[in-house]
Image: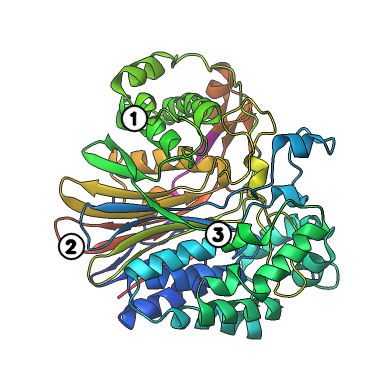
């Protein structure tokens, strides 16, 4: 699909040797430098991700979790990494209910699962890294110490949610400027976090999970009534797992398995493939995706949990028999009601993709769940904790119920695409709940509508979720009226829907083609 150069927008970025695309230009530049110096795609991804902890603190950090998909050499041998943190060993629904709670509050220590990101980075580096570990943290240490200029989208998000860090004095001291949000152009420094990065750079994952940083985290959480123990941190371990996949228009789409929601994305992708989206008008396409999303998210909320503790029926969910049932549930003339969706809304995540000169590709996503996570930060090393534990149920009969050492249902999902015996490339979508629907929409844009990665990310979005159908503003009044006639309750969110990045290889020329979502501050870079 040719670009109209008379309209605002950007071209896809193309390169032959290496590529990285992130949601922040300084993170992209830092990762690209690593690639140009001979570092692996994983080296570049770790460098960029750690820097994003400074550049986009409302989105991500070392107090969060990480998932990744990797192709070591550009082959279709895809490896998945699950860096989901676990509930403290002493956590239980009974213990939480004994405090008069029927759900896990965001700003409580019970929302803080043990951060899995740093161990995930270490596992990735041990298996796929080329540069020295300490080299990867030099940019994040520099920017945390000397400051980074706040970019426009970051400032917008910061300004919407300054109250999320007001309750905790350590967080307020770190993330507010004279009691208010940082503005675009302000210089933001995190000297305490820089000291944590220095210990990680020197001592590896033990610099975070065993020693003064761990002691700082443990003291803060136990002072608030958390169930956390030092052994919860010391024993944290990310794990390599077997990815799951489904086919879509001649391509294979790879996702991390549960406890992530990647299976919901695959269910969605399989459903929408049964409809000729390219021949449909915009209203029908939006309707199909919304109705398929209701089915996939209902299944996710019913079945997806930690597979170490629960039986998650992945094969059944992706079976041809189930697909036929799901497709039959979609009425093109009438929207079905939403039901069974009570998973917490949480919009904040970072996603990045990288490919190096030897063909290694990494799809990586890192998150603290809510904007500024739990809003709880440590006094000594400035670790901002995620609120991922809020995804657990307190109901003892639900598969996703909280229990000691258990991983919650996770929404962050990196993606990878192959075709036959060739790797096409990594992709991912940000936006919390939106991610599974976003994967399906991105795949349809790429392979049903023939868009390049940048065009596919630029395209208008919709999202049927939690009782409403969200539409970005480019849909016409006539299209909106027809959607309402079918029974959709429309919502025009003030914030853009999600974000995303992708790097795909042109299998005819070998050239890498990248896109970076205009809804964020980011960019793609290659050489």
- The picture places residue 331, in percent across and down from the top left corner, at 45, 14
Give the quadrant of residue 486: top right
For label 2, the SS is: loop
**Residue at point 18% right, 62% down?**
510
For label 1, the SS is: helix
Residue corresponding to mark 2: 510
Task: Report the disc number at residue 20.
Answer: none
Task: Give above or below for 70 relative to 256.
Answer: below
Task: Choose between 86 and 365: the one closer to the eye.
Answer: 86
Closer to the chain start, of discs 2 and 3, is 3
**Residue at point 39% right, 31% down?**
314
Give the quadrant of residue 92: top right
Residue corresponding to mark 3: 235
Q: Label 1 crowding class (10 Å Cα cut-off): few <14, some 14-19, many 20+?
A: many
Task: Give above or below for 160 relative to 391.
Answer: below
- The picture places residue 45, in percent across and down from the top left corner, at 42, 68
Left or right of 309? Residue 21 is left
Q: Is residue 477 visible?
A: yes
Left or right of 261? Residue 112 is right
Which region of the structure is painted magenta? 458-463
Residue corresponding to mark 1: 270
For label 3, the SS is: loop
Give the foreground label among 2 and 1. 1
């Amino acid at each position: 699909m040719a670009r109209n150069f008379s309209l605002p927008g950007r071209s896809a970025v193309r390169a032959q040797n290496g590529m990285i695309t992130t949601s922040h230009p300084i993170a992209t530049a830092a990762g690209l430098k690593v690639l140009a110096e001979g570092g692996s795609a994983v080296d570049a991804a770790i460098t960029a991700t750690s820097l994003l902890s400074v550049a986009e603190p409302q989105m991500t950090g070392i107090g969060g979790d990480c998932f990744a998909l990797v192709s070591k050499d550009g082959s279709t041998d895809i490896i998945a990494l699950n860096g989901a943190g676990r509930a403290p060993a002493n956590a239980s629904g009974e213990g939480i209910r004994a405090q008069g709670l029927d759900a896990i509050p965001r700003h409580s220590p019970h929302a803080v699962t043990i951060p899995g990101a740093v161990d995930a980075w270490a596992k990735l580096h041990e298996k796929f890294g080329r540069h020295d570990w300490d080299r990867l943290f030099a940019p994040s240490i520099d920017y945390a110490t000397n400051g980074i200029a706040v970019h426009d989208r970051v400032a917008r998000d910061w300004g919407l949610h300054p109250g999320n860090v007001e309750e905790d004095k350590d967080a307020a001291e770190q993330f507010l400027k004279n009691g208010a949000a940082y503005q675009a152009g302000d210089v933001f420094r995190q000297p305490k976090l820089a000291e944590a990065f220095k210990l990680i750079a020197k001592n590896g994952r033990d610099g975070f999970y065993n020693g003064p940083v761990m002691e700082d985290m443990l003291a803060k959480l136990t002072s608030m009534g958390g169930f956390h123990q030092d052994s919860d941190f010391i024993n944290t371990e990310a794990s390599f797992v077997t990815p799951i996949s489904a086919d879509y228009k001649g391509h294979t789409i790879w996702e991390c398995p549960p406890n992530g929601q990647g299976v919901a994305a695959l269910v969605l992708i399989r459903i929408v493939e049964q409809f000729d989206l390219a021949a449909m008008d915009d209203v029908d396409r939006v309707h199909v995706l919304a109705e398929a999303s209701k089915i996939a998210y209902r299944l996710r909320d019913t079945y997806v949990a930690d597979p170490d503790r629960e039986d998650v029926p992945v094969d059944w969910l992706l079976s041809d028999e189930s697909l036929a049932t799901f497709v039959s549930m979609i009425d093109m003339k009438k929207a079905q009601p939403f039901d069974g969706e009570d998973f917490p809304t949480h919009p904040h995540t970072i996603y990045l993709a990288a490919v190096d000169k030897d063909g290694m590709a990494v799809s990586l996503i890192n998150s603290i769940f809510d904007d500024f996570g739990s809003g709880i930060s440590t006094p000594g090393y400035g670790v901002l904790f995620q609120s991922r534990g809020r995804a657990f149920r307190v109901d003892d009969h639900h598969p996703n119920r909280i229990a000691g050492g258990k991983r919650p249902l996770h929404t962050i999902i990196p993606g990878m695409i192959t075709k036959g015996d060739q790797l096409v490339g990594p992709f991912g979508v940000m936006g919390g709940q939106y991610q599974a629907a976003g994967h399906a929409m991105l795949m349809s844009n790429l392979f049903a509508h023939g868009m390049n990665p940048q065009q596919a990310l630029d395209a208008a979005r919709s999202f049927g979720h939690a009782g409403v159908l969200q539409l970005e503003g480019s849909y016409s009044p006539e299209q909106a009226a027809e959607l309402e006639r079918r029974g959709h309750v429309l919502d025009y969110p003030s914030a853009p829907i999600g974000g995303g990045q992708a790097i795909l290889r042109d299998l005819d020329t070998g050239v890498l083609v990248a896109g970076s979502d205009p809804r964020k501050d980011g960019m793609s870079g290659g050489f």
